[in-house]
Amino acid sequence: MTSCSNCGAGLQPAQNFCPKCGSVQAQVATTAPPPSPEPAPVAQAATPQPQPQPQVVYVQQAPQPVVGTKSKVVAFVLAWLLGGFGIHKFYLGRIGQGIVYLIFFWTFIPAFIAFIEGIVYILTSDQDFARKYG
């Protein structure tokens, strides 16, 4: 009879795991232990050892550059030349805003706003412009 290497419980020679603690036993040749003058230690109830949890590693990838289909230079030119009619808004896919510009073009307010928007378009970085207007 052998003992568990983890908890010290008695095992049969053919057992591969301990019925008390569930640990897997190494297959070793069974030889009779040499007689010892000391009494065998008393087996204590062992608590099951916690299994190590796998570590999850999150890898942050570098952000991919945003590539847009609209040109900020074209939007700038349309805003300055035909901004009063909202042509730059139609180009950028803002149809509703373009219609509002068309309705109020006779007040010259859309032309003034388009002039300022053209400056904003040309000063915006390529990444931000592509993210906002595609």
Image: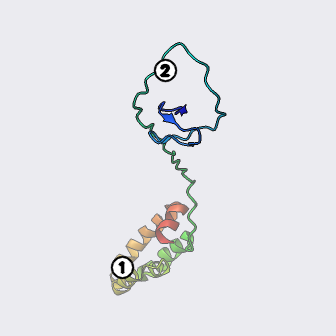
| Label 1 crowd (10 A; few <14 / some 14-19 / many >=20) | some
Question: What residue is shown at x 44% (from left), y 39% (from top)?
Answer: 20
Task: Compute the Cα span from label 1 to label 2.
Answer: 103 Å
SS of the residue at dot 1? loop
Residue that lies at the very extreme toward the top in this rendered image: 37
Q: Classify residue 30 by image quadrant.
A: top right
Name the residue that disc number 1 marks.
108
Residue 114 image offset from top left, x and y in percent = 42, 73
The N terminus, quarter of image: top right
Residue 3 image offset from top left, x and y in percent = 52, 31
Amino acid type of disc 2? Ala
Residue that lies at the very extreme toward the right in this rendered image: 29
> In front: 69, or 99?
69
Question: What residue is shown at x 37% (from left), y 82% (from top)?
Answer: 96
> In front: 38, or 62?
38
Residue 117 image offset from top left, x and y in percent = 43, 69
Q: Do the residues labelled 1 and 2 touch (CB within 8 Å)?
A: no
Name the residue that disc number 2 marks.
40
